[in-house]
Image (cartoon, rainbow, N blue to C red):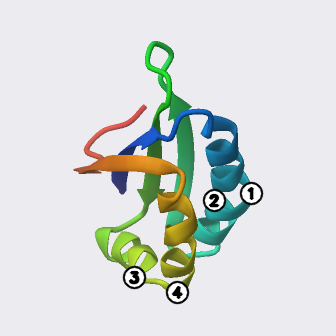
């Protein structure tokens, strides 16, 4: 299992639009990909406009296939229009309860 943590700095006053985009368009497209295991969207409680998307795939290869897919490429410009930048960290899940 692999997790990708993406922290977004969403544009001011675009949080609701960002959340709607992730829920209505991004998640369904990702869920159709082989190996998709889940997505969580977290909003920081103390910092306005900061979100973390936690994406899970069963393997690194399946995660890489999502990032190179036509769906990801077509959705990326709309997603990028809603934020000022991202920080990305990939993890291998070694234990979970």
Q: Residue most toward the top?
A: 46
1 and 2 marks in contact (CB < 8 Å): yes
Marks 4 and 2, how far apart in space?
Answer: 14 Å
Callout 4 secondary element: helix
Between 89 and 82, the one lying in front of the other is 82
Query: On residue 27, which mark appears?
Result: 2
Disc on the earlier residue, 3 or 1: 1
- Where does residue 36 sit, x and y in percent of width and height? 53, 65
Marks 3 and 2, how far apart in space?
Answer: 16 Å
Whether residue 10 is visible, yes or no, is yes
The residue at 49%/40% (across/down) is: 10
Between 20 and 31, the one lying in front of the other is 20
Between 83 and 41, the one lying in front of the other is 83
The residue at 35%/68% (across/down) is: 59
Callout 1 secondary element: helix
The residue at 62%/66% (across/down) is: 31
Disc on the earlier residue, 4 or 1: 1
Along the horizontal axis of the image, is 49 left or right of 65?
A: right
Q: Is residue 56 above or below residue 53?
A: below
Disc on the earlier residue, 3 or 2: 2
Q: Say which residue label 3 marks.
A: 68
- Where does residue 6 sit, x and y in percent of width and height? 37, 47
Q: Say which residue label 1 marks.
A: 24
Query: On residue 70, which mark appears?
Result: 4
Query: On residue 89, which mark appears?
Result: none
- Mark 4 burial class by Cα count in 10 Å: few <14, some 14-19, many 20+: few
Callout 3 secondary element: loop
The image quarter containing residue 17 is top right
4 and 1 marks in contact (CB < 8 Å): no
Disc on the earlier residue, 4 or 2: 2
- Mark 1 burial class by Cα count in 10 Å: few <14, some 14-19, many 20+: few
């Amino acid at each position: 299992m692999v997790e990708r943590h993406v922290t977004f700095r969403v544009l001011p006053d675009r949080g609701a639009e960002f959340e709607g985009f992730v829920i209505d368009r991004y998640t369904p497209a990702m869920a159709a990909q082989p190996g998709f295991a889940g997505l969580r969207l977290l909003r920081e409680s103390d910092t306005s406009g900061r979100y973390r998307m936690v994406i899970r795939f069963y393997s690194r290869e399946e995660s890489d296939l999502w990032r190179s897919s036509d769906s990801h490429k077509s959705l990326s410009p709309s997603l990028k229009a809603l934020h000022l930048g991202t920080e990305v960290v990939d993890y291998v899940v070694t234990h979970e309860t």
